[in-house]
Structures are given as structure tokens and as C-alpha cells.
Image: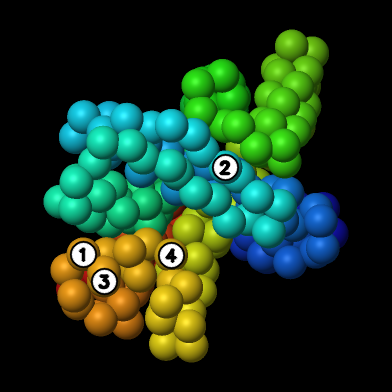
Amino acid sequence: MRDLLSNKEFVFYAVLTVCFGVMYIPVVGKYIRVLETMIHESGHVLMALLTGAKISKINLFSDTSGETHIMGAGKIKTMFIAWVGYPFSSAMAWLSFWAIDSNYKQIFIIILCVLTCIFLVAYIRNGFGIFWAISFILANGYLLYKKKTVIIEILASIYADILFLSSLFSCFIILYLSFKYPNKAGDATLISKITHIPPQIIAIIFVVLCGVISLSTMKNFFPLFDHLKLF
């Protein structure tokens, strides 16, 4: 057992597997996955700010869904804002693994807490979203204050794994919804209404974009995937 725990590859994939399992535990799994929801919504927020649109509020829900309410955005701006959510989440997962690989685990946790704090003060307005943000900040802030280095390092890896898995799986969920319930496929439906491109095509593009970013994450940061060829 001690030999296994000293094997970095084994530990990496063991944590990844545990995270995959935890993601689907009722209540606990959904609570953790809201982190990726916030990152997804932050992509919308960033694009809204870049295009000059006004953000009225953000809602984070206990079922891991979220919504960003934008004001003053025409069809073109709305389309760009809608496009960025899923690829942004995958890109942030890539950066999360980079931070861990570069030994910036504590800084990674601090950045997540600061981002959550900004969202709490400026954007989040629904009850569950406020509860989630406050509890996330307090829990991680306490560990940082008490300098619980080992726990912080473990949490950093868990958060990165959750962002990676959830950002990728969310795309496939949207793909499923685009075929099963095309009028309820979130960003794909919104973009489809603007461009008149079928939501199924939009969802496939989301899967391809996030898939390429996820493959890059695996190639650069997953043990045993060093020789993975993207093209």
C-alpha cells in the first residue's frame, strides 16, 4: 500500500477516479460541481464586460445549472457571450492543472476564493448562490488562514479534477439535450435562435472545442499521456 501511495501516477488517477465518483453523490457532488458552474458563468461575464454589455445578476442553482442575466446586448453581443462559456471552463481547467504543475496550489485556491468573493459582492443574487459562495469562501479561507498545507494541496488537485471532468461532461449533456429537448439546450439553443443554425450543430461544436482543450490538458499534465498526438 505504501508503495502505491508513493507512486505519483497511481495517486493522480486515484484522485481523478474518486472525484468522478464524488461528482455524482447526491447533494455533495452537486455542491462541488457548482464551482465549474461559476467558472462557466465567469466566461459569460468576461465576454460581456469586453463587449460593453451590462450584467444585472448571476444565479447559481443547486442542480449545478446557472444563468447570467445580461442587459444592453444586441444579438451579436449575445451570441459571443453565449459562445464563450463552455470553452472558457475547459480553458480554466487547463490553467488549473498548469498552476498545480507549477506548484502554485495555494495561489490557485486564493484566486478561486477571490473570484468567488467578487461574484458574491457584484453579481450573485439568488439564495442558493449566496449560500454556496459564502460557504466556499469561508471553508477555503479557514484552511488558508490555518496554513493547512497538505489539505490545501489535496483540495487544489480535487478542484482541478472537478473543473476538468465537469467542463467536459457538461458539453456532452448539452449535446444530449440538443437532440432530446432542442428548446432547452441552454447556450446552444440561444445561439441557434440568433444564427438559425440547428442547436445540435452548435452543441457538436462545443464538444469539439472542449474536447480539443481537454486533450491538450491530458497531453500536458496527465501522467502517461506525454506522447498523446492531438492531430
Please tell me how crowded label 1 is: few (under 14), some (14-19), or many (20+) other residues with Cα within 10 Å. few
Cα separation between marks 1 and 3:
5 Å
The residue at 57%/42% (across/down) is: 59
Circle 4: residue type: Gly
Badge 1 marks a residue whose secondary structure is: helix
Which residue is label 4 attached to? 186
Cα separation between marks 4 and 2:
14 Å
Please tell me how crowded label 3 is: few (under 14), some (14-19), or many (20+) other residues with Cα within 10 Å. many
Closer to the camera in the image, 20 or 190: 190
Describe the colour scheme in one phrase: rainbow
Circle 2: residue type: Asn
Q: Which part of the image, by quadrant, shows the N terminus?
A: bottom right
Q: Which part of the image, by quadrant, shows the C terminus?
A: bottom left
Numbered tag placed on residue 49 in the rendering: none
Cα separation between marks 1 and 2:
23 Å
What is the x, y in percent for residue 215? 35, 65
Which residue is label 2 attached to? 59
